[in-house]
Image (cartoon, grey):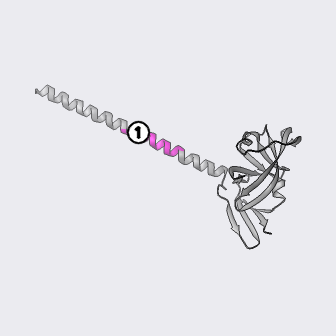
Amino acid sequence: MTEHQQNQELADTGSSSDTIGKNMMIIAWIIAMALATWFFGSLEDKQFNPNESPVTINNQNTIKVELLRNKYGHYIASGSIDNKDVVFMLDTGATHVAIPGALEGYLNLQRGQSYNVHTANGTAKVYATKIDRLEIGGIVLDNIQAAISPTMQGEEILLGMSVLKQLEFRQKGNKLTLVQQKF
């Protein structure tokens, strides 16, 4: 093998090593970006719903659920309707539990009588329905009046007064405590 051929072979090997190194660096950057996206996405979700697993205090006579206010000033909490996971937004201005039409099928709810409601966005047509079981933290309520709102945007269910009137609730600072009396 001539000296020129040996130099060419060494140059080719170095070039191959450089290519592998560059590819490994690109893969490392892609993985780092994916991890950063996942981390900051979950951090943002936590800021929207700081109550993914609401704190429940079970005393002899009461069940207390403590909710933290989110960064937007709302009380958002994970819970369930008829054993299906949902996200609630507490709304003392809502008469009933208001369910976006997009969740009607997921929750397997039946539309009842239609009626008009007055919202911040004007008048809307909704349909009466009944929730067999609603849970938020350790609080469980049965046979809740609700309304399916076909034009309601989002996937948060407004937890209105048809639920809240059955509970005591008090707010202090950035914490809201819901209290259910045991019977």
Q: Residue at x 74, y 50 (%)?
A: 89
Q: Nearer the viewer, residue 107 or 20?
A: 107
Q: Identify which residue, 121 or 59, lies in the foreground.
A: 59
Which residue is identified by label 1?
A: 27
State which region is magenta: 24-37
Indicate whether residue 111 is drawn in magenta: no
Q: Disc count in the image?
A: 1
- Secondary structure of the residue carrying tag 1 is helix
Q: Which residue is the extreme one toward the left? A: 1
State the image coordinates of residue 32 (x, y, percent, origin top left).
46, 44
The residue that appears at 49% across and 42% down in the rendered structure is 34
Residue 53 shows in the view: yes
The one nearer the camera, 62 or 27, is 62
Image location (x, y in percent) of residue 96: 83, 50
User: Residue 26 colored magenta?
Assistant: yes
- Vertical placement of residue 178 versus 93, above or below: below
Q: Residue at 69%, 67% (x, y): give it.
A: 57
> Quadrant where the N terminus lies?
top left
In this view of the protein, which residue sits in the foreground, 86 or 26?
86
Residue lying furthest bottom: 60
Name which residue type carries label 1.
Answer: Ile
Quadrant where the image shows the C terminus: bottom right
Prevailing secondary structure class for the magenta stretch in the rendered image: helix
| Quarter of the figure with residue 102 | top right
Q: Is residue 77 visible?
A: no
Q: Residue 39 in the image: state x and y as whole percent.
A: 54, 48
Height in image: 161 above or below 119? below
